[in-house]
Image (tube, rainbow, N blue to C red):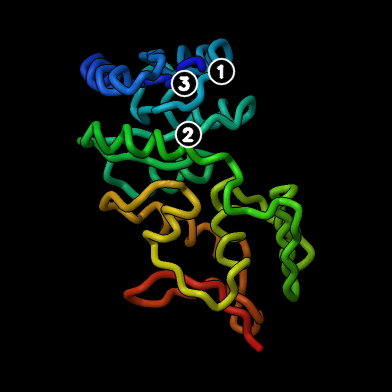
Amino acid sequence: MSAQVILIADDEPQIRQLLALYFGKEGFQIEEASDGAETIVKVQQLKPNIVLLDIMMPIMDGLEVCRQVRKISDVPIILLTARAEDEDRIMGLEIGADDYITKPFNPREVVARVKAVLRRSPRDNFATGEVLRFPNLEINMGEYKAVAFDKEIVLTAKEMEVLWYLASHPGRVFSREQLLESVWGYTYYGDTRTVDTHIKRIRQKLGAHESTPWDIKTVWGVGYKFEVKP
């Protein structure tokens, strides 16, 4: 079996060397890029299994790289960011990144999360041939498409999977940790804001209001549920 290819895109040589050391020990084939343009070229040429992508890079930043890569590939992308602003995280997830890891990070955590993403097939836990229907809402997992109030809603792959997972278990409350494990494929490492960001974006896009018979509800201190009114 050939080694899985990881593309480490970061303009800091020390970061690339550190991650290459850890992933090399795990048997990965390591490829590196030091700027945004080089990253896009290597995604096209090498077709890696996963990309670790720094946001702050020269020539083209990681967010623009993510936009461009999503036009040609659905390769899993995990953003590496030193920025604390929520806007960067939200933007990255909105344009198609699967997750983000904030610097400074524990390289063992990065390895564990990458391995979990690769271990999980793209549509585990999702009955792709099924369509969920509620009043003014249809969720088609086979086509990764949702229609709300007779309008197609543009959702990222992860937003679609979160919506599907909650809606396929109406009334059941899931903790953030459970959603991370079921949708993202890895266990809790201390930062569940990825889930919160996705829920926020899904709510905005669906546009449910007070009289809508369904909604994603927050259960304070626990997590989230897809609620359907009788």
Q: Secondary structure at mark 3?
A: loop
Q: Are marks 1 and 3 in contact (CB under 8 Å)?
A: no
Circle 1 or circle 3, nearest the eye: 3
Out of 155 and 75, give the one closest to the viewer: 75
Locate residue 97 relative to residue 215 in the image: left or right: left
Q: Locate residue 196, reporting x and y percent.
A: 41, 59
Outermost residue toward the front in this view: 1
Mark 1 Cα-neighbour bin, 10 Å: few <14, some 14–19, many ≥20:
some
Residue located 73% across and 73% down the image: 134
Locate residue 26 relative to residue 95 in the image: left or right: left
Q: Which residue is mark 2?
A: 118
Looking at the image, tell me whether mark 2 or mark 1 is earlier in sequence order: 1
How much space separates mark 2 and mark 3, taking CA atoms? 9 Å
Mark 2 Cα-neighbour bin, 10 Å: few <14, some 14–19, many ≥20:
some
- Quarter holding the C terminus? bottom right
Residue located 32% across and 39% down the image: 101
Locate residue 209 relative to residue 198 in the image: left or right: right
Q: Relative to 125, is 69 above or below?
A: above
Q: Locate residue 81, reporting x and y percent.
A: 31, 35
Give the image quarter of residue 132. bottom right
Q: Which residue is mark 1?
A: 47
Label 1 amino acid? Lys
Mark 3 Cα-neighbour bin, 10 Å: few <14, some 14–19, many ≥20:
some
Circle 2 or circle 1, nearest the eye: 2
Outermost residue toward the bottom in this view: 230
Label 2 amino acid? Leu
Disc assigned to residue 4: 3
Q: Locate residue 151, reporting x and y percent.
A: 76, 60
Q: Are marks 2 and 1 in contact (CB under 8 Å)?
A: no
Looking at the image, tell me whether mark 2 or mark 3 is earlier in sequence order: 3
Label 3 amino acid? Gln
Residue located 42% across and 42% down the image: 99
